[in-house]
Image (tube, grey):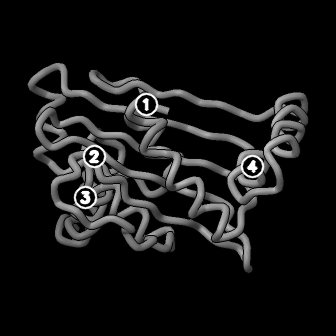
Amino acid sequence: MKVRFAPLLLAFALLWLAGCRASGPGTPARTVAQFFNKYENRSGFKATDWNAGLTTRFLLGRLGKLGGNSDLSQALTSIRSAKVLTFTPTSNSAQQLMVEGLDKEVAGLLASERYTPLPITNTDPDIPNQMRYSVREQGDRVTELVAIGGEKNTGSFVLMAISGSFTRAQVAELSKVLPNVTSGGF
């Protein structure tokens, strides 16, 4: 009688251990939203969330018309929301995240969520804060632009997720402006 329950007990124990592992802090995020939720309250991370309300979009639309109908002004008026997650290691456990592969986790979730990486326009190795971009498309429109960057010397990291409805030309213009925004030199 005991022999029949041994496989059942073993299966139950393995499922329980797998469930414990899936809910632990070392589990990789599966979506960009999960990544933000996972890290926004941890030591060294700071999250900022911005949603474009009706008034803001109206004002951006007016500013876009004043600036002409350039791709950048049209891209700015198409932004629905933006999230930014920055990381600067402030403790040994925070520094361990970089060793464990924070960049690899983001790269894995972007690949599994079918984001398309954009080519890097300037491949100069002397640029310390090179941003990498990926987009999620629906038909001929880009619905989300994700920018990843950081500085290897300090171990800092930044992830930006911008939602809206953009053309590829508008995304190209946004990608020219974003490095200046993240470095504070806009």
Disc 1 residue type (three-letter) = Gly
Up the image or down, 71 lies above or below 49; here it is below
Going from N to C along the chain, the mark reached first, 3 or 1, is 3
Where is 84 relative to 78, above or below?
above
Q: Residues within 10 Å of mark 3 (few under 14, many from 20)?
A: few
Question: Mark number for residue 129?
Answer: 2
* Foreground of the two, 56 or 2: 56
Pointer 4: what residue?
73
Whole-percent x, y for residue 83 in the image: 56, 38
- In 3D space, how far apart are the residues under numbered discs 1 and 4 (Cα atoms)? 19 Å
Spatial CA distance of label 2 from label 1 is 13 Å
For residue 185, the mark is 1
Mark before the other along the chain sequence, 2 or 1: 2
Which badge, 2 or 3, comes first in the chain's sequence?
Answer: 3
Question: Given the image, on which type of amino acid does mark 4 rest?
Answer: Ser
Which residue was labeled with disc 3?
A: 104
The answer to whether the residue labelled 2 contacts the one labelled 3, judged by CB atoms less than 8 Å apart, is no
Number of marks: 4
Measure how far apart labels 3 and 1 are at the Cα level.
Answer: 28 Å
Question: Horizontally, is 16 left or right of 142 in the view?
Answer: left
**In the image, which is nearer the foreground, mark 4 or mark 3?**
4
Of the image marks 4 and 3, the number of the one nearer the N terminus: 4
What kind of element bears circle 2? loop
Q: Which of the two discs, 2 and 4, sits closer to the camera?
A: 4
Counting from the top left corner in percent of width and height, residue 99 is at: 10, 45
